[in-house]
Amino acid sequence: MTEISFLSKKGPRSAMEDRLLIETDLLKDGRIQLFAIFDGHGGSTVAEFLLQNFAKILRKKINFSELKTEELIIEELKKEVVEINKINPENIQILKKVSTNL
């Protein structure tokens, strides 16, 4: 069993806008653990969307069965993070509708 601890501290804003994602078995095969912090940057909309959908997006878009080494998995994850980072906060409402199909 994996033991995980974390600490979060709300800054001067009225609410915590950051989100923490912990997936201890991303592919349900014991190969990949995913830990991510999504920084709210002035609002929690994108961070909350990613909390709910990031792992689903990775599972859907990356063919992990073809990636035989840790280096290949890391490279694919980096590519997807770059693409996901292009999400415009104004498009989140559209993405929320699309994400129901993930």
Image (cartoon, rainbow, N blue to C red):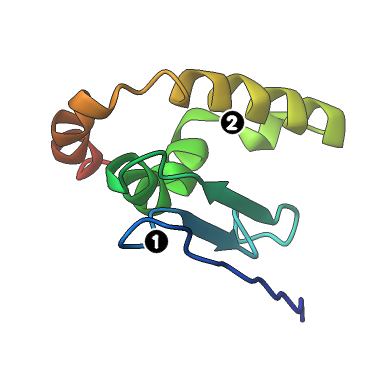
- Of circles 1 and 2, the one toward us is 1
The answer to which image quadrant residue 92 occupies is top left
Q: In the image as oriented, which residue stretches furthest toward the front?
A: 12
The residue to which callout 2 is attached is 63
Tell me, yes or no, if residue 69 can be seen here: no
The answer to which image quadrant residue 43 occupies is top left
Q: Residue at x 32, y 45 (%)?
A: 49
**Depth order, front residue of 84/73:** 84
Question: What label sits on residue 45 in the rendered view?
Answer: none
Q: Is residue 74 above or below residue 19?
A: above
**Depth order, front residue of 46/66:** 46
Give the mark, 1 or 2, whose residue is nearer the N terminus. 1
Quadrant in the picture for the C terminus: top left
Q: Is residue 37 above or below residue 71?
A: below
Asked whether, in this view, residue 81 is left or right of residue 88, the answer is right
The residue type indicated by label 2 comes to Asn
Element on which disc 1 rests: loop
Q: Residue at x 70, y 56 (%)?
A: 33
The residue to which callout 1 is attached is 16
The span from disc 1 to disc 2 (Cα, nearest Å) is: 34 Å
